[in-house]
């Protein structure tokens, strides 16, 4: 099992300036020193939930000069919001700065508010994502593309600087769609997923479908599945439970207004503003229990080992440990020591 760090912080008024990114940078340096596989940062816009990370290429560039070995990955680039030339150029720079350590997970996007930057792409976002992946990969290899210029005349362009890696390592982000898993396999990419809208048995079935699709379309390999998992390990279960209860509950409450309108990928399912505060508290408490007991990796190193064993049996190749959900920087960095112990046992 590979172990990586995953960042998706809830931005806060309690911190400012460089302090906002202290955990991000210090955690990445820890991962670099201790043999973790990668550091992932998302692309999020216009909301506190994930709001520290509007551009993973920018945070990736910071990691490129702050680390030496750990892989630098976007989890994810929302492809329909950007021109493929821009994606290829930005990430080629990061690939050069890092000596060839980048990878990108592409997403189609889901929240309508994000598409204020490119509203025309929302209705066809999945098709746009597929086209963008193909174009970015061709540009990455050094191929040229022909596009209309400012005079609406064909112009042949290629990306500079050339990337260090001859092929772009890529994944497709899936909230749980079996079709997306199969598509990723056919395209020869990995899958980045989570347990927010699927359980372990569903994930097992989708990974099997992904492997089958991958092998059907490619002579070598079987793909790569990354599971994002909220993570905090410590010396005892009860200590960890009490330490993370407040921060994780607050994190879930902040996310509630964002995800409530997109349950099951159906925008506008309900408006969180119409729900009573007591009902929100009930939902947050249930969410905390679900995350702590079934949808995260919390507790002792021994409990973490059981989670890893289960995920290996399901077919997961890498755990993206989401660590920045509100626990203090010093305490979170201390918990990484326990995570490193787990990695050394099961990595």
Image (tube, rainbow, N blue to C red):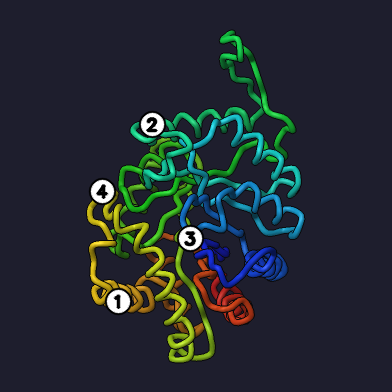
Q: Position of residue 98 (x, y in %)?
A: 73, 49
Marks 4 and 3 sit apart, C-alpha to C-alpha, by 21 Å
Which label's residue is closer to the chain start, 2 or 1? 2
Residue under label 2, please give it. 127
Marks 1 and 4 sit apart, C-alpha to C-alpha, by 23 Å
Give the quarter of the image for residue 195.
Answer: bottom left
Disc 2 or disc 3, which is closer to the eye? 3
Q: Give the SS element for disc 4.
A: loop
Residue under label 1, please give it. 281
Q: Give the SS element for disc 3.
A: loop
Disc 2 or disc 1, which is closer to the eye? 1
Q: Which mark is residue 120?
A: none
Give me the residue at 23% from left, 53% from top: 269
Neighbour tally class for label 3: few under 14, some 14-19, many 20 plus, Cα within 10 Å: some
- Do the residues under discs 2 and 1 have CB atoms within 8 angstroms? no
Q: Give the SS element for disc 1.
A: helix
Q: Give the SS element for disc 2.
A: helix
Q: Position of residue 158 (x, y in %)?
A: 67, 23
Disc 4 or disc 2, which is closer to the eye? 4
Give the number of marks. 4
Q: Position of residue 118 (x, y in %)?
A: 45, 34
Give me the residue at 28% from left, 63% from top: 201
- Do the residues under discs 1 and 4 have CB atoms within 8 angstroms? no
Q: Which mark is residue 266?
A: 4
Q: Is residue 50 left or right of residue 145?
A: left
Residue under label 3, please give it. 48
- Do the residues under discs 2 and 3 have CB atoms within 8 angstroms? no
Which label's residue is closer to the chain start, 2 or 3? 3
Which label's residue is closer to the chain start, 4 or 2? 2
Give me the residue at 64% from left, 53% from top: 59
């Amino acid at each position: 099992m590979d172990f990586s760090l995953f960042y998706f912080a809830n931005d806060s008024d309690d911190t400012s300036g460089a302090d906002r990114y202290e955990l991000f940078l210090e955690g990445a340096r820890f991962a670099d020193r201790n043999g973790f596989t990668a550091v992932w940062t998302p692309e999020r816009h216009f909301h506190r939930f994930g709001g520290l990370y509007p551009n993973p290429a920018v945070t990736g560039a910071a990691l490129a000069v702050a680390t030496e070995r750990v892989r630098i990955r976007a989890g994810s680039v929302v492809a329909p919001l950007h021109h493929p030339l821009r994606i290829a150029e930005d990430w080629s720079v990061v690939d050069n700065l890092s000596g060839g350590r980048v990878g990108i997970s592409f997403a189609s996007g889901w929240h309508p508010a994000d598409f204020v930057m490119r509203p025309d792409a929302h209705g066809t976002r999945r098709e746009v994502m597929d086209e963008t992946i193909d174009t970015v990969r061709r540009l990455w290899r050094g191929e040229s593309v022909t596009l209309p210029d400012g005079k609406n005349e064909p112009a042949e362009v290629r990306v500079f600087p050339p990337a260090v890696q001859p092929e772009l390592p890529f994944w497709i982000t899936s909230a749980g769609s079996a079709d997306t898993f199969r598509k990723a396999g056919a395209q020869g990419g990995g899958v980045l997923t989570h347990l927010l809208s699927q359980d372990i048995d569903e994930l097992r079935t989708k990974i099997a479908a992904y492997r089958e699709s991958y092998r059907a379309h490619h002579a070598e390999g079987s793909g790569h599945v990354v599971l994002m998992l909220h993570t905090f390990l410590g010396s005892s279960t009860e200590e960890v439970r009490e330490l993370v209860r407040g921060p994780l509950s607050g994190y879930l409450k902040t996310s509630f207004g964002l995800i409530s309108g997109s349950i099951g990928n159906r925008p506008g399912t309900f408006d969180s503003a119409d729900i009573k505060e007591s009902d929100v508290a009930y939902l947050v408490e249930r969410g905390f229990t679900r995350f702590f007991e079934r949808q995260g990796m919390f507790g002792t190193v021994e409990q973490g080992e059981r989670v890893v064993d289960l995920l290996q049996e399901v077919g997961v190749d890498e755990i993206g440990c989401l660590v920045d959900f509100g626990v203090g920087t010093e305490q979170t960095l201390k918990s990484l020591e326990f995570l490193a112990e787990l990695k050394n046992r099961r990595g």
